[in-house]
Image: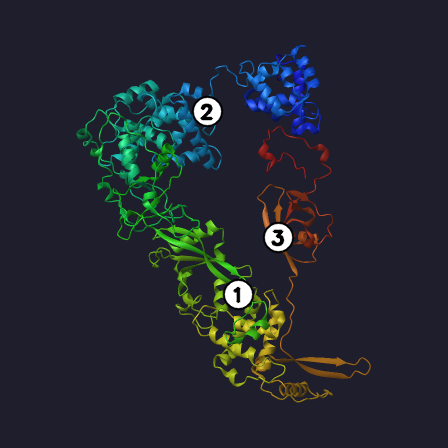
Amino acid sequence: MDVLGDIVPSKLADRIYTLAVWSSSSSANAKGLNFREILSLLVLITRGTREEKIKMMFGLLTSSNGVCIEKSEMFRLVREWERDCLPHELQHLFAESEKVSYDRFLIWVENYPDCLGLSKWLLTPTDHFSLVNKLDTPTFYQTLAGVTHLDEEEIVELEKRFWTLTGSSHSGQIDLNLVKNIVSPPLPDDLAAPFFHALDENEDGHIDLKELSCGVSAACRGPELERQKFVFKMFDLNRDGVLNEDEFNSMITLVNEVYLQLNKNDGNSFVTKNYGKGTHLTLQEFLVWTTSCESGHMKEFSKLLYQLCHVCLGLKPLTRSNEGDIVRGWIEREEKLPHSSGSIWNLVSMNWWSNWHSYVNFHPHLTPKLLNKSKKLNAVASNHSQGVVATGYSSISDINSGSTTSLSSLSSKKSIDESNITSSANALPRPGHIDNSNLTIPSPYRISSLTGEGARLKPKIQQGKDFELVPKRLWEALILWYGDAGVMSLPRQTILNSNGVFEVELYPIAVKIMKHQVVPRPPQIPTVVGGYSAAAIHAAGNLPTTTRRYIANQAVFSRRTTINQISDFLSSRLVIKMEDMRLWFYRDDLNMKQLSENECRTLEDLGFRDDDGILVEVRSRDGTWPEEISSLMSGGNKNNFNNNNNNISGIKGVTGLNNLGNTCYMNAAIQCVAHTQILYKYFNNNCHLFELNRTNPLGMKGHIAKRFGDLVRDMWSGEARTIAPIKLRWTIGRYRQHFSGFQQQDSQELLAFLLDGLHEDLNRVTEKSYFELKDSDGRPDDEVAAEAWESHSARNKSIIVDLFHGQLKSKVTCKVCGHESVRFDPFTYLSLPLPMESSVHIEVIVIRQNGSIPTKYGLTLDMDSKYTAIRNHLTKLCRIPAENLILVDVVNAQFRVPPSEEQKVKNMNGTCIFAYEFKARPESKLSHVTTTGNTQTFSDIQRSRCTRNIF
């Protein structure tokens, strides 16, 4: 009843509530209707269609089954709602049957819409029941429009810009840092803070929508005096309504700086008559002074603020002539600023630019002859934007290079001849959104671009004929004014070519960004790979996964971009660590090279052309490089991945081994053996080829020795800085399945297998005879050792035995008879224990009772030392008796006293120990201590001053 009002009968309201609960999602519980359901009901009653309201009436009048209306039930409900009145039209409804379906009820209602009070209430339009408050309360936009020179539509558009700016801020608000990025340049850096200060009315450190609207209105709308008041507010930093001497001088300096940016040839400085030392200028005096000021400094500064509020803050110009003045003034300023590499310019199609020019320069009362005298617009200049690598443009670093449009010659070009503008009786239409499609060609690749260059330009397009250039911020303003639906942005950057001329690079280099993709292993292995049969390679098992190259993305970079800058960009853009990424130049399979040695060279220096590729090689999880593995799997051709290494004269022996997938353990063992001086000379001179033992049943048919010898020769050739030992690895995996996979293994275990395999493959003994060693029988050790070695050499004779085999003496003594038996057994390697550190290093800070500066001592103690040892060592160093030192640990900012003096130092919790000097106080004088009346300060608690000796 409270919701529907008093005009609805209570029983009808109960019926409506029952129907709403039954049909709502909350019918399962008895908690009633939620807000959403009540709102839906009210919208149905007040704003529902005629068909929806008739269906609601049918639901209210149906019986419990909800399928049809029964005559008795409807008569009962109508009597309750209509005060016992039954309209005679009801007889027509039930003329054929006691039960009526919805279709029959719909026809009856359409014929008798005013028969029932319910139908008259729902189907007849009325103002008695409405969800809208008809009171004329001004909205927020109307309120703002009433206190500013902006209308509601402009405030709505300004609000869109407000939320865009807050979304781009790190703090989520329009703070000083964001304002500096927006307005500086064109404002000098020192003017960004005063500008923010003038907008921040409540001085809370950020600008809200109300402050932005009021500030923009004061800066660029209304009469000239209103705009000068905003200038006064900028420099009245203490908000006292008066410009003091410092504020006045700061204003003169900054306004003069802005003026000289546009009038460099004008040597006149901002001279202020009658204002000097001790100046205090009120607002009224300031307005009088600006009005009487003969120079154009203040007008130029006010003009800049006017343009800035429109271009940077998104306010739309009031009239077409204002828009033309703003755009022309902005471009004129950009032309006069110093050129800088990295500034961004956007291309605008000449078709749209001509229409826009006709629109803003339209004057029905002017003749074509008068229009001829108007100023020609130059659309090209430079700005202070930061240098970038890609035309996207993520700011990476300054780029200096050549391009296609010289800035030094741009000022002489004419963007459009205004004499072609003819007057007519009707105003020219406003141009639509910017369409640059006639300047571009489609990309040959349907892949995403990592940079924001927009699109490729048609070849040989000309400025002034096909397009015009506008500064980046002016382009963004035009997008705000004319819409961004389907607009193609074509940003291009300014670079410095080799001749020292600034140019706009219209045609940066478009490259393909390539990656690797894992290819499933083929079911069959080639017949021969690197000299091995298919059976031999298959025996090795777990072959490396092969990969293929594919085009993942495209990107556009300046021709003067260095490889190092591209590496930084791709590492950040693709989220890859620099140490896990290598770049390759790729034109085709026969023309590719690694770029790691050319980080400081530019794309132009390296001969990059459009559609060349940059292959991004990412290290696999097992530490391998896909390009190396793929090259080795395709036959071990070094030209693909060692091409860059082969051009560098290496030092013989200083050659690394590539990781083939968790093969660091193998590489470490091979490097140790291959750098044994006598052994590498033996293999490097091919001596092993004369001693290969292919019939030794304990050997590997000479395969291990042959492959190891080939690898040693490659390592000591000095032709490459890195080599992949894949053939030796396959051979080792063939004869020891344990090393065939790509899991981490023990390096010493592989070293033992390698030395044993080399020995058996190079064993000069072809037939091994059996020898029984004699007992020492008390003979001298030299004799027994020589006999044992002779027996060992009779069965084992190789370069490995000469270099790596030795003897270990063992002696067994009988405890009963005292007989001693001595043996000399051969060995190849020994396991030696690593010495363990037996001392602990601690730091102790000694704090003396007299308040002197604490002293830090470093102590080296045995692992089993106790806390008492610390006292004894400190006594020797700081001359404080051990009994006067209290030791505490500091753990998690808490003091902890050792539970026992017998606790070992190695079990201490903290990393540093504090030792406090604590002298016992005399007992005889304890009761006679008197305090002085000297006033103590808080600092006395910390150090030095004491009125009595309390310790």
| Residue 157 in sight in this render | yes
The answer to whether 285 is drawn above or below residue 571 in the figure is above
Give the farthest residue toward the front. Answer: 96
* Quadrant holding the C terminus: top right
**Residue 277 as seen in the image, left or right of residue 34:** left
Q: Amino acid at mark 1?
A: Asn
Label 2 sits on what residue type? Asn
Q: For the residues marked 3 and 2, what is the alpha-carbon distance in whole angstroms?
A: 63 Å
User: Looking at the image, which residue sits at the far right?
Assistant: 816
Tell me how far mark 1 sits from mark 3, CA to CA. Answer: 53 Å
Looking at the picture, tell me which residue is in the foreground, 674 or 865. 674
Disc 3 designates what residue? 877
Mark 3 residue element: helix
Q: Which corner quadrant of the image does residue 328 belong to? A: top left
Secondary structure type for disc 1: loop
The location of residue 372, given as percent across then percent down, is 19, 32
Q: Is residue 307 left or right of residue 843?
A: left
Q: Secondary structure at mark 2?
A: loop
Mark 2 burial class by Cα count in 10 Å: few <14, some 14-19, many 20+: few
Judging depth in this view, the residue of 482 and 565 nearest the camera is 482
Q: Position of residue 502 (x, y in %)?
A: 28, 47
| Quarter location, residue 248 | top left
First in sequence: mark 1 or mark 3? Answer: 1
The residue that disc 1 covers is: 659
Disc number for residue 673: none
Looking at the rendered image, the disc whose residue lies closer to the viewer, 3 or 2, is: 2
Tag 1 near tag 3, CB within 8 Å: no
Residue placed at 49% from the left, 65% from the top? 630
The vertical placement of 259 against 38, above or below, is below
**Count of all numbered marks drawn on residues in the image:** 3
Provide the residue designation for mark 2. Answer: 202
